[in-house]
Image (cartoon, rainbow, N blue to C red):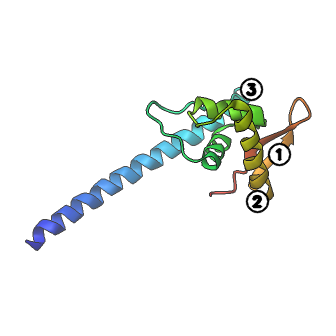
Amino acid sequence: MGDKYIEALHQAQAEMARLEERRSVLLRLIANLKELAEQDDGLAFELTPPPGYVPKGLTEEIRTVLSLTTVHLNPVQIRDVLIRRGVAHSSPKNLLINVHTVLSRLHDARKLDVVKGADDKPAFKLKTNDSD
């Protein structure tokens, strides 16, 4: 009976190793695509999620958007991406207010790289040295 469990354990470990290798390949692909996108006149990544995507909390969605982009985004751009990503909101104006609140907290926590945008207003991107 114990051999059956040991065999299942080995199969699970082998599957985990395959998944970790696949994850590693995907991470390298993402890094390469980011580099290519930056070389292409700062072209931003497509921030539209895959079909069936279920949005997370607002802060986590903003972090995701700011970590996926290759360019700094202003709050209005972030709001528009969040709407495309299916984030629930009562109105675009209220969502923009909430975006400003989250950006303020992330900035206070030193998680954001902030630059002046084309309109002299701040634009944001997640710092690359933060893993959380």
Do the residues under discs 2 and 1 have CB atoms within 8 angstroms?
no
Q: Residues within 10 Å of mark 2 (few under 14, many from 20)?
A: few
Q: Which mark is residue 114?
A: 1
Give the CA separation, mark 3 to mark 1: 20 Å
Across and down, in percent, residue 63 comes to: 65, 47
Q: Amino acid at mark 2?
A: Ala
Name the quarter where the C terminus is drawn: bottom right
Across and down, in percent, residue 24 comes to: 46, 49
Do the residues under discs 3 and 1 have CB atoms within 8 angstroms?
no
Determine the residue positioned at 64% across, 40% down. 65
Q: Nearer the viewer, mark 2 or mark 1?
A: 2
Q: Which mark is residue 41?
A: 3
Determine the residue positioned at 58% across, 48% down. 57
Dot 2 corresponds to which residue?
109
- Quarter of image, res 39: top right
Q: Nearer the viewer, residue 92 or 19?
A: 92
In the displayed structure, does residue 124 sit left or right of residue 27? right
Do the residues under discs 3 and 2 have CB atoms within 8 angstroms?
no
Q: Amino acid at mark 3?
A: Asp
Determine the residue positioned at 54% across, 46% down. 56
Circle nearer the N terminus (3, 1): 3
